[in-house]
Image: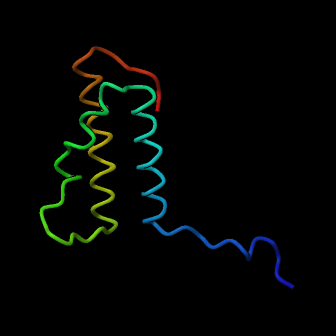
Amino acid sequence: MKSSNENFEEKTPIQILNEQILAKTLWIRKNEPELSKFLTEMPVSIPTEENPTIDQKNLSDYLDSLNQLIENYRKEHGGVSKSI
């Protein structure tokens, strides 16, 4: 008989990154809505290829760019906003 833990598969690094990106994006929209306009303008989110590959590095780079967006905003507007 299988234990209940065997029914759950471990998350892949890509699944984890997708969850982190979603959480960060939702946080920005809720807590720093003025940054929302930059989400669609971020170079990392605009594919340069017709059929871009979305892999762990692309997702990691995108998450890093979201973190950088928040960090730069905080530096320019003095201080720390609501925590992430």
Residue 19: x %, y % from top left? 48, 54
Image side of residue 36 versus residue 13, left or right: left
Q: Tell me, what colour scheme is on the image?
A: rainbow
> What residue appears at the point 31 percent right and 42 percent down from the top-left corner?
66
Q: Is residue 31 above or below residue 61?
A: above
The image quadrant where one finds the N terminus is bottom right
Extreme-top residue of the structure? 78
Q: Locate residue 57: give its quadrant.
A: bottom left
Image side of residue 11 versus residue 57, left or right: right
Q: Is residue 43 above or below residue 59?
A: above
Image side of residue 36 versus residue 76, left or right: right
Residue 41: x %, y % from top left? 19, 42
Q: Which one is nearer the viewer's eye here, 66 or 34?
A: 34
Q: Which one is nearer the viewer's eye here, 53 or 61?
A: 53
User: Across the whole image, how many numbered discs are drawn on residues?
Assistant: 0
Q: Is residue 79 above or below residue 73?
A: above
Q: Which one is nearer the viewer's eye here, 6 or 36?
A: 36
> What residue appears at the point 29 percent right and 52 percent down from the top-left corner?
62
Q: Locate residue 52: give its quadrant.
A: bottom left
> What residue appears at the point 31 percent right and 24 percent down from the top-left corner?
34
Q: Locate residue 11: give its quadrant.
A: bottom right
Extreme-bottom residue of the structure? 1
Residue 29: x %, y % from top left? 40, 32
> What residue appears at the point 26 percent right and 45 percent down from the top-left corner?
65
Image side of residue 74 versus residue 3, left or right: left
Extreme-left residue of the structure? 48
Extreme-right residue of the structure? 1
Residue 50: x %, y % from top left? 15, 70
